[in-house]
């Protein structure tokens, strides 16, 4: 039986292992951490459970698909609940808005709250769908780097519609074209952060992202986000994928321009196929130091990182739901701080995620588990203790303004993760959440392909390569790797 080695058990690595197993490979995963999941991990702080990384889950069918691939009923192994409310938004002037998942209901309420035309909002959402439908087959579901991709009817359709995709203007300018109310513009600008980019730079094609939430819906898995990686890990074990934890791969073996296996210290392991789920930067710098690296790709600006306070709160808040946003008063300046000054803004947008709203066992009765996150610059060796102190003060002030409560006296447990921790936990270069940022119009083409152009039998999956970061795209990267391994030409 042909053999495949996967480096890293992040969501992309787990999915790639399953895809290759289905194709008949004997698959072994080597993971540096003592656990599977990478960024999709969880912690227990006293009686509070927290998901450590992702909190927003959309396109759950991409997880289900992996169960059906092995003739299993997804609901028997992985269950999730759809949310009727996408997010609660708060502004400092007292404006509040509850974004409903259903597009018509969303448009009606947004029109009332922001005094905009309901028709314009519906038109915006229709345009979002159109952009997604046109581009997903080209930009998300196939390798962008194989000639075959450009010979399909779907691709030709997408290419002929390029001028409608708003590639040459920013997301902010597209949103300003539709709406006068700066708050509604800000709400739609926020979608740039779903891939760690700035709405003032990222191309307008990103206005397709709201379609994902409104069409596919937003979900929370039973057991929390961690269940996504855990259920796939259990499936992988069941179908015969082998795992080795606490095994940091030290190099990829290459002979005659072909990957022949990996080494871990003095131990060498041979394989027919090698898949790296590691961030592409350390894959080249640490595992392939003698091979020429695609420097232009590696030099792409990295996505934003995050600073997260995990707080056990001895109080409940009716006005909050699973996803809540307290917006900055100057969004443009906040992104300048993140991407240009590499600093924490004094009035940051604060995201509060509370899984105990839907999973009561995540916190004791009368308490809540708050995941409080602000977007942050990558790790450029800033003075993080100082930035953390500054961020905490700004966050507490923002919460007091929105909810009228000084939350500091309600914090019973605390854990903090900053870009340094994100980087060291998963080898994510500069602690980027989503690999490279989409802060230019060619970003999609500049991401690393899912295969090596120079080394045969070496493949790449996960958030730092095509089609990009975030759970759905990582799952798609694994699907593309599966297709490429089966049909490398
Ligand atoms: P990773 O999770 O990056 O894992 C890579 C694995 O490789 C790690 O387990 C690492 O230990 C291992 N590894 C590295 N080097 C080696 C080595 N030398 N040998 C062996 N193993 C190695 N996405 C969403 O969809 N929704 C969200 O709401 C969301 N929010 C986020 C919030 C935070 C705080 C973070 C950090 C991320 C968030 N993301 C979100 C992004 C999402 O988590 C990632 O895009 C995705 O999980 C990355 O998966 P991956 O397959 O690239 O692997």
Image (cartoon, rainbow, N blue to C red):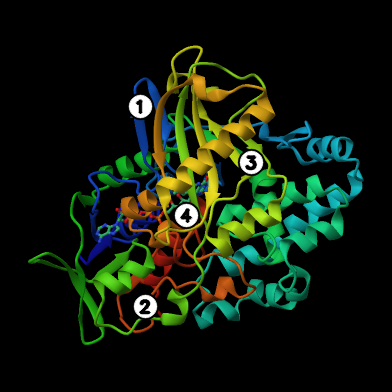
Q: How many marks?
A: 4
Q: With 29 as the anchor, is 423 left or right in this view?
A: right
Q: Give me the C-alpha separation between circle 2 and circle 1.
A: 42 Å
Give the CA distance from mark 2 to mark 3: 35 Å
Q: CA distance from mark 2 to mark 4?
A: 23 Å
- Disc 4 Cβ-to-ligand 1 distance below 8 Å: yes
Q: Circle 1 — which element?
A: strand
Please give the residue where the numbered disc 1 appears in the rendered image.
Answer: 45
Question: Which numbered dot is residue 452?
Answer: 2
Is residue 82 in sight in this rendering? Answer: no
Q: In the rendered structure, which disc, 2 or 4, sits on the residue that comes first in sequence?
A: 4
Evaluate if marks 2 and 3 touch, with contact meaning CB atoms under 8 Å apart: no
The residue that label 3 is drawn on is 217
Is there a contact, CB below 8 Å, between mark 3 and mark 4? no
- The residue at which mark 4 appears reads as 433
The answer to whether the residue labelled 3 contacts the one labelled 1, judged by CB atoms less than 8 Å apart, is no
Of the numbered discs 3 and 1, the one sitting upstream in the chain is 1
Of residue 380 and residue 11, the one placed in the foreground of this image is: 380
């Amino acid at each position: 039986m042909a053999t495949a080695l996967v480096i890293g058990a992040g969501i992309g690595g787990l999915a790639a292992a399953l895809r290759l197993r289905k194709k008949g490979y004997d698959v072994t995963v080597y993971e540096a951490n003592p656990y599977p999941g990478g960024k999709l991990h969880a912690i227990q702080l006293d009686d509070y459970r927290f998901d450590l990384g992702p909190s927003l889950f959309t396109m759950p069918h991409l997880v289900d698909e992996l169960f059906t691939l092995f003739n299993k009923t997804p609901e028997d192994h992985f269950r999730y609940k759809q949310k009727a409310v996408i997010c609660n938004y708060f502004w400092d002037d007292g404006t509040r808005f509850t974004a409903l998942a259903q597009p018509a209901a969303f448009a009606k309420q947004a029109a009332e709250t922001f005094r905009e035309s309901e028709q314009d909002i519906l038109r915006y959402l229709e345009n979002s769908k159109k952009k997604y439908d046109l581009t997903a087959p080209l930009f998300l579901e196939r390798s962008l780097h194989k000639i075959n991709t450009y010979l399909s009817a779907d691709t030709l359709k997408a290419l002929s519609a390029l001028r409608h995709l708003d590639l040459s203007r920013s997301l902010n300018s597209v949103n300003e074209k539709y709406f006068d109310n700066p708050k509604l513009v800000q709400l739609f600008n926020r979608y740039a952060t779903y891939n760690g980019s700035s709405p003032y730079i990222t191309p307008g094609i990103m206005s397709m992202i709201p379609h994902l939430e409104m069409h596919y819906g937003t979900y929370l898995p039973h057991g929390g986000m961690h269940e996504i990686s855990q259920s796939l890990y259990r499936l992988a074990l069941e179908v015969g994928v082998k795992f080795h934890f606490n095994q940091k791969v030290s190099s990829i073996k290459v002979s005659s321009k072909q990957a022949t296996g990996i080494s871990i210290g003095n131990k060498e392991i041979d394989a027919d196929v090698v898949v790296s789920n590691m961030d592409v930067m350390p894959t080249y710098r640490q595992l392939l130091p003698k091979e020429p690296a695609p420097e232009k790709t590696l030099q792409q600006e990295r996505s934003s990182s995050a600073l997260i306070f995990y707080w056990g709160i001895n109080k409940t808040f009716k006005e909050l739901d699973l996803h809540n946003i307290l917006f900055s008063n100057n969004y443009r300046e906040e992104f300048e701080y993140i991407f240009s000054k590499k600093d924490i803004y004094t009035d940051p947008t604060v995201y509060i995620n509370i899984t105990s709203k839907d999973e009561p066992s995540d916190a004791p009765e009368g308490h809540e588990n708050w995941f409080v996150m602000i977007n942050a610059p990558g790790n450029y060796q800033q003075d993080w203790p100082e930035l953390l102190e500054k961020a905490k003060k700004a966050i507490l002030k923002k919460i007091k303004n929105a909810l009228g409560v000084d939350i500091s006296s309600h914090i019973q447990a605390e854990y903090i993760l900053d870009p340094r921790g994100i980087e060291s936990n998963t080898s994510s270069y500069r602690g980027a959440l989503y690999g490279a940022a989409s802060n230019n119009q060619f970003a999609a083409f500049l991401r690393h392909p899912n295969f090596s152009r120079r080394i045969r039998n070496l493949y790449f999956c996960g958030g730092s390569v095509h089609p990009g970061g975030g759970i759905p795209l990582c799952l798609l990267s694994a699907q593309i790797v599966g297709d490429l391994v089966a049909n490398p030409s």
